Image (cartoon, helix red, strand yellow):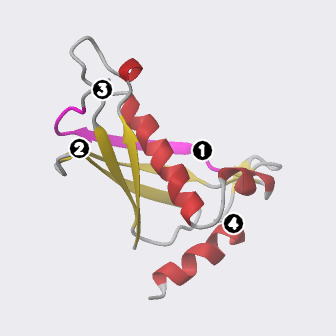
Amino acid sequence: MHITETTLQVQYYETDQMGVAHHSNYIRYYETARTDFIKSLGLSYRQLEESGTAMPIINVNCRYIQPATYDETLTIKTILKELPTSRITFYYEVYNQAGKLINEGHTVLAFINQEAQRPSRVPEILMERLRPLFSK
């Protein structure tokens, strides 16, 4: 298992008139955290794409526990529980600034060979970064 943490602040434009973050923003928060996770491996989505791999989301699950509010600092834990094969599942836990779990979810992404537009296995450039994290 590998876990990273991302912090972000709820912006005014993400909220409704009551100052509550709109539910759709959590999917964006997940994307920000997932991008940070990949960066923590010394990679970027750009590098994965340049290697010929696309990673479309094929499933999103999001459970709302308590609302996030304007100007609140959120901490998102991104968790990879197992090595990927032809798909990768990221789990998310979103905490408010008081440290309370307010949201959890997961996304499933497929690996697609961009040239063939067909499913493929996890690219080696990613696996070589992940293997050492799971061999401990």
Crowding around mark 2 (Cα neighbors within 10 Å: few <14, some 14 to 19, many 20+) is: many
Q: Amino acid at mark 3?
A: Ala
Cα separation between marks 1 and 3: 25 Å
Q: Nearer the viewer, residue 38 or 19?
A: 19
Marks 3/4: CA–CA distance: 35 Å
Is 19 located above or below residue 108 in the figure? above
Helix, strand or loop at label 1? It is loop
- In the rendered view, would you say 11 is above or below 88? above
Q: CA distance from mark 4 to mark 2?
A: 34 Å
Q: Residue at x 49, y 43 (%)?
A: 31
Q: Are marks 2 and 1 in contact (CB under 8 Å)?
A: no
Res. 123 mark:
4
Side of 93 relative to 86 (left or right): left
First of labels 2, 3 by sequence position: 3
Query: Which callout, 4 or 1, points at the residue further toward the start of the chain?
Result: 1
User: Label 1 belongs to which residue?
Assistant: 56
Secondary structure state at the residue bearing disc 3: loop
Separation of marks 4 and 1 at Cα, in angstroms? 14 Å
Amino acid type at circle 1 is Pro
Quick one: which residue is furthest to the bottom in this view? 136
Q: Decide which of tag 3 and tag 4 comes sooner along the chain.
A: 3
The range drawn in magenta is 55-68
Query: Looking at the image, which residue is at 63% across and 55% down?
Result: 111
From this viewpoint, which residue is outermost toward the top?
A: 17
Q: Disc 3 designates what residue?
A: 21
13 versus 135 height, above or below: above
Tell me the quarter of the picture where residue 70 sits.
top left
Q: Nearer the viewer, residue 86 or 65?
A: 65
Residue 19, quarter of picture: top left
Q: Residues within 10 Å of mark 3 (few under 14, many from 20)?
A: many
Identify the disc placed on residue 96. 2
The quadrant of the rendering that contains the N terminus is bottom left
